[in-house]
Amino acid sequence: MNSRKRILSVDFGTSNCKAILFDQDGRILSSSMEGVKTHFSTTFGSVELDDQELRTSLFSCIRKALSGHDDTEAELVAITAQATSTVCLNQKGNAVRPVISHLDKRADNYGRRLRLQSRDLSYTGLKLGGSLEWIKETQPDDFKATKSICDMREYLGFLLTHRLTHDKSALSESDVSKLCDILRIDESAFGLQHDYLSPIGNVEPNISQELGLNSEVPVLLCPWDGLTCVIGSGLLKLGLAADIAGSTETVAAPVSNQSRLGTRNHLIPNFRLLYDSFPFGLAFEWFKSAYYGGSTIDQFDGIEKDILSIPSTDSSRGPLFVPTLREGWLNWIMGGSLIDLDFRATRGQMMRGIMEGITMSVRHFLDRLREDQIEIQELRVSGGGANSSIWNQIRADILGCPVVLLQTIETGCLGAAIFGVVSLGIYRSIDEGSNQMVHEVDRYQPLRSNVERYEKMYARFTTAYDHFNRKD
């Protein structure tokens, strides 16, 4: 038997479920991906997942990851997922109604009302509480049948272990108590607390057999996917930044504890995070679908071919995408504008303009680091958007710093594996585990001629960005 420890990581995101089997050095042994079927209704603002489809995606993804390697023994299953969704379970542990996605808008007014009642409720408390208030008022029979409540990660853990828990960092005991007082439900509805280094229990024997796992495999619930991606990107010191280019694009950088810029707690001592998530990936997918007839181009081959065919004489100007960000209920609502649009533009020029505009938006956010006299030494890129070498070079040229492509672009899964190896005692701390398991595979250096050209373009971009995003 191989003495190297193996961690099975699961990241259940907005559009895909990923499962990867890692060894303790961060090497991928096998992997799989399943599309997540999400049900949208633009008329009513509902975004839901069917609980049976969710379970099918999760179990199928795990089985495929385990069957893809000769030595499928995993010492631990580590889970991260999108935040925050609402799952209601009945007395038997079955879903009362479809899972309410974090993208759902129907409960926004209920969440705002809840904030007025209790201003110190956490993000998770407001999202869960708002959804539950909406269910209570509009679907009273479902609310009456609800005996247990959890977020997506906790539901995935429950499917494997039949143990219900809640994240003590995201949903404190004070949050639970306030929600239960407001909703008039028992505190046991949220289950016991869990942290990020203590397993919630073992995979149920019948589930282990169904998935091809050994019996008694512990299950660890990690932070929500954005923060887990930060750990999987190795953001351990000042001067590093990450662009996690998924369906929702997460941009983050460590700052000192004293910084005014820190928007999230970091799991590395002495740091906070400049952190936000933007729906840039969804915008890119919209344009890609519009220009490529709904083609699912995961590796950017067709797009890169079109961009490379653009004559060099047309490189200095062209259409540029300017996102329009409006603050919604605890998230961003995005539209956008195209400036310098020439109706003779090819789809390659259009897609390059989308890439440039999204990257300039990332720079606009990271420029705040200069307030703290922090220069970005390198940007670490991961997620599906990291698959394009052309886009990575655009990032380097616009940001004026090296762009590092990580060996594992699924940093949510890698971050979960890092929590897993620390939980098993292989490494002493999260930062030690990240140092050992996060590896660079390629590096893009800024090209001086492109940097100069993009500086001029960025000046036009910021003028347009400030105009379209002004608060009236």
Image: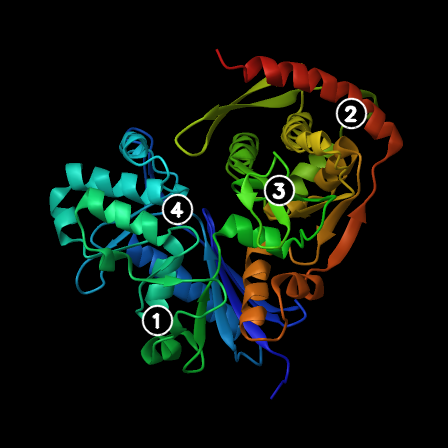
Question: Which circle's residue, 3 or 4, is located before the other in the chain?
Answer: 4
Front label number (2 vs 4): 4
Q: Secondary structure at mark 1?
A: helix
Neighbour tally class for label 2: few under 14, some 14-19, many 20 plus, Cα within 10 Å: many
Q: Which residue is mark 1?
A: 161
Query: Quick check: 233 left or right of 286?
Result: right
Q: Compute the Cα span from label 2 to label 3.
A: 22 Å
Image quarter of the N terminus: bottom right
Q: Which residue is mark 3?
A: 252
Mark 1: amino acid: Thr
User: Which picture quadrant has residue 121?
Assistant: top left
Q: Position of residue 460 (x, y in %)?
A: 71, 16
Asked whether residue 316 is in view, the answer is no
Mark 2: amino acid: Tyr
Q: Nearer the viewer, residue 316 or 184?
A: 184
Question: Which circle's residue, 2 or 4, is located before the other in the chain?
Answer: 4
Front label number (3 vs 1): 3
Q: Secondary structure at mark 2?
A: helix
Up-down relation of residue 312 to residue 79 (above or below): above
Question: Which circle's residue, 2 or 1, is located before the other in the chain?
Answer: 1
Mark 3: amino acid: Ala
Question: Which circle's residue, 1 or 4, is located before the other in the chain?
Answer: 4
Question: Which circle's residue, 2 or 3, is located before the other in the chain?
Answer: 3
Query: Quick check: 387 left or right of 159?
Result: right
Q: Which residue is mark 4?
A: 84
Is there a contact, CB below 8 Å, between mark 2 and mark 1? no
Q: Position of residue 229 (x, y in %)?
A: 58, 52
Neighbour tally class for label 1: few under 14, some 14-19, many 20 plus, Cα within 10 Å: many
Q: Which residue is mark 2?
A: 454
Question: Which circle's residue, 3 or 1, is located before the other in the chain?
Answer: 1
